[in-house]
Image (spheres, rainbow, N blue to C red):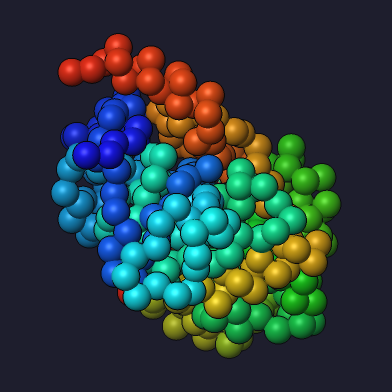
Amino acid sequence: MATMLAVRFHSYGSPEVMGLEEVPRPLAGPGEVLIRIHAASVNPLDWKVRAGYLKERLQHRLPLIPGWDVSGVVEAVGPEVTAFSIGDAVYGMLDFRRNGAYAQYVGANIKDLALKPASIDHIQAAAVPLAALTAWQSLFEVAGLAPGQTVLIHAAAGGVGHFAVQFAKWKGAKVIGTASAGNESFLRELGADEVIDYRTTRFEEAVRDVHVVLDLIGGDTQQRSWKVLKKGGILVATLGIASPEAAREQGVLGQGIGVHPDTAQLGQIAALIDAGNLKPAVTAILPLAEAAVAHALSQTEHVRGKIVLKVGDRTVESADADAGAGASKEAHPDPR
Ligand SMILES: NC(=O)c1ccc[n+]([C@@H]2O[C@H](COP(=O)([O-])OP(=O)(O)OC[C@H]3O[C@@H](n4cnc5c(N)ncnc54)[C@H](OP(=O)(O)O)[C@@H]3O)[C@@H](O)[C@H]2O)c1
């Protein structure tokens, strides 16, 4: 039986429950391709799953390989697959209910993939799918953001936020982002018209009459956001709407979002990247063997842009040593 190295956990808990192991290499089933992984990015979803926060909702069977953003090369195609060929460079957001991409190979449904943007490498490409799809679907599918409108993006410097800033700017909207002071120039370079330091300024005193709020924080931030919306405006929240009554009282809409795979949107996003209109910001690149370090970093909730795990030759070498030493798909569920 062919094997591969993968990061797995056998019980929920702290980052250290994850370890590098030799496991069976998956096969490409009907409608799937087998991807030789070059890079996987880290999303808050990954550590929320690992910590067990989503165990009721996602009902994973352990051990589990986490990480659902992938960039790599098609190694084999399953029955009935004509959309991709062996050797194609692909990227995508994998099915959250199955094993993920902290591994050398993954079997992926072709509905979750698109051709990788040609102008960026696998590290950059792996940073894109889940966060960019969330931003795209929130702003365009749910909020219907139009040119000339104003959008307030909370946590604008994070994984989802930094894509949202660029999409909104590209659409012709006025973009206001909240972040700490150290991220102001980063956000202005991405196209933000105004940046509010949430640590020193109450945003609801600085902003009013916005058409759309993208809320990536929830809690008190969400509660204080209702009043900055224009009548008829909409707040889209990745962590759900705590009080629909508050929205009704203000005469605005509140809508939660659960990101879903979309090959066509991934294709449009790749085209924007290749045209120079969108750039993923990768601020940390770690070897696969350091997944626990990557999770601890993500759990600070103050990462700028994205963290990516590299699955390269050197990783495999150190992985071999580590493994030896320790020897012994359709709509995805809401990933909050
Ligand atoms: N429902 C869905 O489908 C879905 C999809 C994607 C993500 N999500 C969820 O959405 C949330 C955001 O995801 P993400 O990937 O963007 O997270 P992330 O990359 O971890 O976000 C980190 C960013 O949050 C900023 N931040 C932290 N506290 C803040 C505050 N009070 N006000 C403004 N900014 C603040 C930080 O900026 P500073 O360092 O400047 O503070 C940092 O840049 C997560 O909870 C994630 O699980 C849900």
Q: Where does the image place residue 177, in percent across and percent down from the top left?
A: 70, 58
Q: Residue furthest top?
A: 325
Relative horizontal placement of residue 330, taking residue 220 as reference (left or right): left
Q: Residue at x 40, y 72 (%)?
A: 81
Relative horizontal placement of residue 48, taking residue 251 as reference (left or right): left
Image quarter of residue 48: top left
Residue 25 at least partly seen: yes
* 154 and 62: which is toward the camera: 62
Name above or below for residue 157 compared with residue 32. Answer: above
* 41 and 44: which is toward the camera: 41
* 219 and 319: which is toward the camera: 319
Q: Where does the image place residue 297, in percent across and percent down from the top left?
A: 50, 31
Q: Where does the image place residue 23, in percent across and percent down from the top left?
A: 25, 35
Look at the image and tell me in which quarter the N terminus lies: top left
Name above or below for residue 58 compared with residue 201. Answer: below
Q: Where does the image place residue 73, in percent across and percent down from the top left?
A: 52, 52
Q: Residue at x 42, y 69 (%)?
A: 110
Look at the image and tell me in which quarter the C terminus lies: bottom left
Q: Residue at x 68, y 75 (%)?
A: 210
Residue 152 at least partly seen: no
Q: Residue at x 61, y 34 (%)?
A: 284
